[in-house]
Image: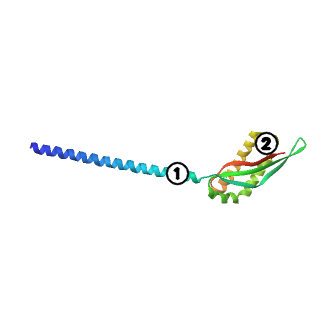
Amino acid sequence: MAENQTEHGTLTNNRRKKRFLLFASILVAASILGTIVIVLSLQSQQAQDETLEAIYFTVEPSFKKHFMVSGRPRLIELGVIFVLRDERLLIPLTTHAPRMKSAISLLLGDQQFAELKKLPGRELLKEKILLAAQAIMQEEVGEDGIEKVLFSSYTLQ
């Protein structure tokens, strides 16, 4: 009878060891699989970031607006560049460029010449142009897509 209990105890210990080894193996396999998934997702994210280079879309021709300031004629000439990251938005941007040009022209007409001479006024104009262009893209394409507005020329006379 003592031998039966010893054999039973040994069998129980063996079963516990097997269960522990099975559990440990499953845990190690899950950890390895999780690590592989994380590494692969990071690599694909890095590859996406590398392909998202800035794309510069120049709005042609440059904008000219005449002002009368203290009885004297003044002129602003403005070159605008849109910065985007998604190449597939170039065609819709080209298609809707006339509408954006119109919006920029209207924005220029609402500006005060004295404000445009100051840096905060220029930055505010950039922001207004960006918001107008993004609103048009959002309405027409479903995403704003334009990241930034740059001035390629900014001449006040």
Foreground residue among 10 and 67: 10
Identify the secondary structure beneath mark 2: helix
Quadrant where the image shows the N terminus: top left
Amino acid type at image mark 2: Leu
Amino acid type at image mark 1: Gln
Marks 2 and 1, how far apart at CA:
41 Å
- Depth-wise, is mark 2 or mark 1 nearer the camera? 1
**Image quarter of residue 13:** top left
Q: Residue 3, percent across and down? A: 10, 44
Considering every residue shown, the one lying at the far left of the view is: 1
Does residue 144 appear in this view?
no
> Residue 116 has which mark?
2
Residue 113 vertical position relative to residue 145 in the rendered view, above or below: above
Foreground residue among 61 and 141: 61
Foreground residue among 14 and 69: 14
Q: Residue 54, percent across and down? A: 64, 52
Residue placed under numbered mark 1 in the picture? 45
Identify the secondary structure beneath mark 1: helix
Q: How many marks?
A: 2
2 displayed left or right of 94: left
Identify the mark nearer the N-term, 2 or 1: 1
Residue visible at 36% across and 50% down in the picture = 29
Quadrant where the image shows the C terminus: top right
Disc 1 packing (10 Å; few <14; some 14–19; many ≥20):
few
Does residue 61 appear in this view?
yes
